[in-house]
Image: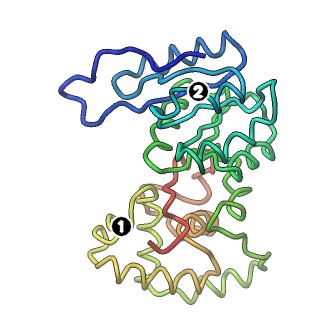
Amino acid sequence: MSSIAHHAPPTAHSSAPPIRVLLVDDHPVTLWGVRQLVESAFPRMIVSGTAATCCELLGHPALGQTDVVLLDLALHDGKTLDCVPRLVGERGLKVVVLTGDLNPSHHQAAVMHGARGVVLKSHPAEDVLHAIERVHAGEVWLDGSLVSLLLGSLPGLSAAPPVRKDEHARRIDTLTAKERQVIEAVVEYRSAKSLVIADALGMSDHTLRNHLTVIYSKLGVHGKLDLYAYALEHGLAPHANGLHASTKTPSQWGALSLDWGSAA
């Protein structure tokens, strides 16, 4: 077990304190490599400590000085997923899973237990740092192949029942020009808060909420994340930031804001 690392304080140019990351992996070489990676990102982030087992993690003295836990899914002393709700619910920490496990159902289980980021060990090292930053900022970082799987299982979202193609066309035909403009803005500003989207559209946040409520009802979707996926699938935002459903694949979605489960 290693407690919080000693570093010089952030420079005067730093706009925010460093993200404190606790690293958990039972392979010493992997743990060493990830530590070097995170420390290389100073002053954006620092290592608050390391652990190699679930027991060591849950009793770690640096948990109180930690913002994000970077957690391997396969610790040898127990069911790693059982640690996640305790870290999130009891400690108020954010969890990013770093794993070599390629099974999407295991990634889904991690998210359902409270993790908000999943990065494969085969991904570029920079993805690990991006995931830590995005999850710390309150967003979700997922491999694109998981997004559709998770649309119906993330808290606040639910999967719509299968709909025939002609039914989709009928629903889309009910959209007004203004509603289509709102959908394009949701796609273009996919990681932004509602206030940012409203400002881009030249309307109040209240007016945007009203538009979204109507759009959700017309299309049968359940939030901004669901709307985002629907818009790309059905070509409703071909001009938003150069995106088109036929060319913008799920793996390119990047991080998605956690407030997308509601009209807010």
* Quadrant of the rendered image containing residue 6: top left
Vertically, is 15 above or below 239? above
Q: Which residue in the structure is indicated by mark 2?
A: 60
Q: Secondary structure at mark 2?
A: loop
Vertically, is 3 above or below 29? below
Vertically, is 55 above or below 108? above
> Dot 1: few (<14), some (14–19), or many (≥20) neighbours within 10 Å?
many
> Dot 2: few (<14), some (14–19), or many (≥20) neighbours within 10 Å?
some
Which residue is rendered at x = 55% and y = 44% of the image?
91
Type of residue at label 1? Answer: Ile
Query: As rendered, which of 203 and 178 lies closer to the eye?
Result: 203
Query: As rendered, which of 89 and 40 lies closer to the eye?
Result: 89
- List x then y, in percent, for residue 214: 51, 87
Which residue is rendered at x = 80% and y = 36% of the image?
79
Q: Quadrant of the N terminus?
A: top right
**Mark carried by residue 197:** 1
Give the left or right position of residue 264, taking residue 200 as reference.
right
Query: As rendered, which of 105 and 51 lies closer to the eye?
Result: 51
Type of residue at label 2? Answer: His
Q: Secondary structure at mark 1?
A: helix
